[in-house]
């Protein structure tokens, strides 16, 4: 496969996954912002969301004070923000259009219709009327895109590069979500939770789990009250949790092996090493070394892995 074609497929999937993850993060922040809390805590939550995507300087340059409504608008429909949902879905559609002969008609029509329908909904003011409904729609369209891809495409290099993009992006976004949301509650993480904050903490951790479709999975796996260390274990180390770091790296390693012409490349070795650390890691060891430090290092390694994949298989990133 031509590297330019592989590059378009890889980034089409990454942008679609990024739009879904942005919708998930916005939804959890929107839901938690409705809980009784101080203005400082609410603003901290929105600042944390901007921090996840490294967009705080860009936002403050355009809008100044961090306000929930402004952040939502900036992250959903602002064309100047390359990580907004509108920008991501536009980029996914443009990448799909560049190589539309590589995949099935159903895949192209799904991508194209998603972009056209989003524009219609934004013009009609549906986002302002019900933000949660639009965010759920974005998640649904991402699910639909993955389902159509798996259900109609030939299992060849085109599919493998698309799935490589999906799971590399998912690993990055899940790590950012866990890092920022645990950092926001680090004062209560290792200490005893007071009765005053117990109800808020339940909704905080529940919202995080719901943002990765993990609430029901947590109940099924642990059958206990929600505990921060178990939430961390579920989202980092569980291979059977679809959006965990471990599950994402399993798919990255698998699809990297399927597109590799050299069975023992340095890129594969590094991906395998990162996956092995998740496979044999324990949550108490992760917490002992510091969750923030662990996730920061993980993000650095995933970013390096993405650059290596770009250099080895795609159009080299600047």
Image (cartoon, rainbow, N blue to C red):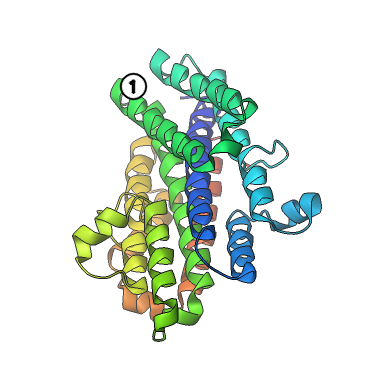
In this view, 113 is above or below 90? above
Q: Quadrant of the N terminus?
A: top left
Q: Nearer the viewer, residue 222 or 126?
A: 126
Residue 113 x, y percent position in the rendering: 50, 20
Q: Residue at x 42, y 20 (%)?
A: 107
Q: Is residue 61 left or right of residue 232?
A: right
Q: Residue at x 64, y 54 (%)?
A: 68
> Which residue is disc 1 drawn over?
153
Q: Is residue 309 visible?
A: no
Q: Nearer the viewer, residue 250 or 27?
A: 27
Q: Nearer the viewer, residue 37 or 64?
A: 37
In this view, 101 is above or below 241? above
Residue 233 x, y percent position in the rendering: 32, 67
Q: Residue furthest bottom?
A: 192
Q: Quadrant of the C terminus?
A: top right
| Element carrying mark 1 | loop
Residue 221 x, y percent position in the rendering: 20, 61
Residue 231 x, y percent position in the rendering: 34, 66
Q: Residue at x 56, y 20 (%)?
A: 116
Q: Residue at x 39, y 41 (%)?
A: 262
Q: Is residue 279 visible?
A: yes
Picture quadrant where residue 208 is located: bottom left
In this view, 6 is above or below 268? above
The count of marks equals 1
Q: Is residue 61 left or right of residue 175?
A: right
At label 1, counting other C-alpha atoms closer than 10 Å, the crowd grade (few under 14, some 14-19, many 20 or more) is some
């Amino acid at each position: 496969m031509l590297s330019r074609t592989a590059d378009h497929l890889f980034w089409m999937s990454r942008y679609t996954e990024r739009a879904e993850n942005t919708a998930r993060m916005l939804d959890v922040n929107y839901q938690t912002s409705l809980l009784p809390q101080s203005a400082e805590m609410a603003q901290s939550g929105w600042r944390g969301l901007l921090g996840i995507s490294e967009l705080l300087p860009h936002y403050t340059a355009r809008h100044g004070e961090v306000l929930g409504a402004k952040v939502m608008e900036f992250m959903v429909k602002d064309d100047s923000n390359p990580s907004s949902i509108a920008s991501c879905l536009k980029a996914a559609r443009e990448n799909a259009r560049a190589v539309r002969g590589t995949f099935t008609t159903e895949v192209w029509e799904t991508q194209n219709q998603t972009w056209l329908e989003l524009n219609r909904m934004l013009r009609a003011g549906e986002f302002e009327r019900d933000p949660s409904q639009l965010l759920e729609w974005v998640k649904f369209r991402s699910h639909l895109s993955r389902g159509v891809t798996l259900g109609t495409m030939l299992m060849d290099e085109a599919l493998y590069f698309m799935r490589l993009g999906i799971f590399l992006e998912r690993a990055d976004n899940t790590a950012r979500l866990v890092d920022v949301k645990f950092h926001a509650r680090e004062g209560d993480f290792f200490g005893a939770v007071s009765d005053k904050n117990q109800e808020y903490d339940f909704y905080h951790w529940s919202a995080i789990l719901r943002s990765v479709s993990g609430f029901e999975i947590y109940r099924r796996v642990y059958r206990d009250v929600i505990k921060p260390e178990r939430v961390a274990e579920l989202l980092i180390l569980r291979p059977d949790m679809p959006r965990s770091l471990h599950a994402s790296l399993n798919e990255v390693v698998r699809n990297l092996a399927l597109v590799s012409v050299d069975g023992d490349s340095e890129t594969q070795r590094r991906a395998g090493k990162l996956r092995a650390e998740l496979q044999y890691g324990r949550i108490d060891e992760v917490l002992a070394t510091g969750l923030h430090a662990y996730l920061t290092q993980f993000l650095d390694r995933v970013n390096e892995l993405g650059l290596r994949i770009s250099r080895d298989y795609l159009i080299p990133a600047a």
